[in-house]
Amino acid sequence: MRILFVASEAYPLAKTGGLADVCGALPIALNAFGHDARVLMPAYPETLAKATEVTELADLGRPLGMSPARLLKARSPDGGLNLFLLDCPPLFDRAGGPYGDSTGKDWPDNPLRFGLLGQTAARLVLDDRLADWRADILHGHDWQAGLAFAYLHAWNMRRPATVFTIHNIAYQGMFDVGWVMRLELPWSLFSIEGIEYYGSLSFLKAGCHYADRLTTVSPTYAREIQSAPQGCGLEGLLAKRSADLTGILNGADYGVWNPATDPLLSQRFAASEMKGKAKARTALEAELGLAPDPDQPILCVVSRLNAHKGMDLVLAALPDRLEKGARFVLLGTGDAEFETGFRRLADRFPDRAKVTIGYSETLAHRILAGADILLMPSRAEPCGLTQMYAYRYGVVPLVGRVGGLADSVAEPGEGERSGFLVDPVAAESLDAALDRALRLFADRPAWRTLVKRNARLDFGWERAAHSYDALYSQLLRQRGRTP
Ligand code: ADP
Ligand code: GLC
């Protein structure tokens, strides 16, 4: 099958979170089954700097009244991923991130930027002249790809089968109704049975409404989003489309997240071999200036900093634990109140808490290599990837019992995948989970057994790729095309 992924980020070409990890790894896992999956994404400056074999495929003219745009063909740095890049410098050639400037403020023309991404995806799957490659399946990811499905519906041509994956329903891409005309969408689509959400244009709803099949990134989240509050207002539509909605748990890319081969570590180790882990811990202490203390665990956070991720709970729970000797390292960016809160915490406990506000692939890997307990008490978590990576790096996850966290972590004794569950996600249960974690950490042989067992868990992408493969095949059969 030829599958076109449409997304706003894919590792290593551009990344702000787990969406990139999925869009960088799942196509490769699908290709291992003999498929031909490729990714269409914007040509951001960092993407053009990293991509290889970049050539022009087609002149896209002046879409949506923009200055000239081009479709490029390229490959990821290691050649493993085939890419189509949407090159439109006035929209994408900017200093800052994929969604906003360096202060984190969203680009005001995001509807145009990602509207054009969706429109280009629809053109690419319909028009042979753009590329000598015709997709059997268009698979869009998150709101940034949502309008692809609306254009395909509006143009009413013989189109490929379509799948839309919701990675996070809290981000819906809602914009003023004036964008409907500006994006050359027919007015008839702007209704409750279409792209309208309470008077605004919703990119996410377009995907949820017009795609043949919907998926999300864990079975539990697939259930949660069919009711309030986790459905964030789209629960009605999703419950109605329940038969078309599947939850498929994401995987971990062990090509990138394996402490035995990780090029970003100064101390590599096999996850089952605890001496190596101890050295990685010492290396992290030295790098950050954290007080060494073999009897006390290092708690860690590598995350976007917001209330969805339960960062207020972490901030409230830590002072007491740090007073009692625990240590803490954090890497993250996000809401100003949390950035400030964690900075203050680090000021208060200068040799026990180290806080890095920023984005660093290297430090993310090194923290997992050196830490002992990952704090991820999310209130909502579609899947979550860091907890899966943590297992391989000898870090035990302590997570909220929601979404994909509930599907990938169980209390010791409850199942083979082990960590600590915060349930319900609130201050008291976080405290209780921390108590259980610290008690087990103090029992060194029991902790070692847990860490070693976790290190053997296999969350590789093969299982998820299998499920997508089955879903695509079934969809094509239903549409009367043999996969
Ligand atoms: P989400 O996509 O909701 O942010 P996930 O757990 O699915 O959560 O994925 C987060 C990904 O982003 C992981 O690969 C994690 O290592 C990475 N990440 C998060 N914050 C940072 C940061 N500040 N620096 C580097 N990597 C980060
Ligand atoms: C989103 C979700 C996260 C998930 C990731 C990849 O960013 O917040 O839970 O792991 O997408 O699907």
Image (spheres, rainbow, N blue to C red):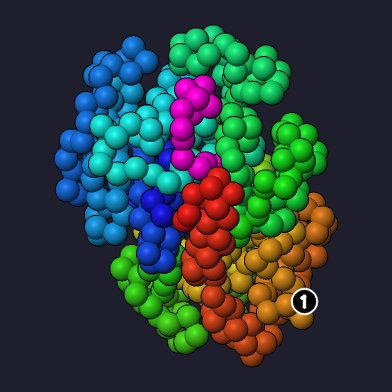
Could you tell me if residue 199 is visible in this image?
A: yes
Which residue is at a point 42% across and 31% down the rendered structure image? 122
Check the image and name the residue furthest to the bottom: 445
Asked which quadrant contains residue 55, the reply is: top left
- Mark 1 Cα-neighbour bin, 10 Å: few <14, some 14–19, many ≥20: few
In the image, residue 413 sits, relative to residue 297, either above or below, namely below
Q: Which residue is under mark 1?
A: 414
Q: Callout 1, which amino acid?
A: Glu
Tell whether 444 sits left or right of 473: right
Tell whether 438 sits left or right of 476: right
x%, y% of residue 401?
74, 59
Which of these two is toward me, 301 or 397? 397
x%, y% of residue 71?
26, 33
Which secondary structure lies at badge 1?
A: loop
Q: Is residue 242 magenta?
A: no
Q: Is residue 165 magenta?
A: yes
x%, y% of residue 212?
59, 40
Tell whether 48 sits left or right of 438: left
x%, y% of residue 424?
82, 55
Which residue is at a point 22% across and 31% down the rendered structure image? 58
In the image, residue 384 sits, relative to residue 432, either above or below, namely above
User: From which residue to which does the magenta span run?
Assistant: 151-166
In the image, residue 267 sits, relative to residue 368, either above or below, namely below
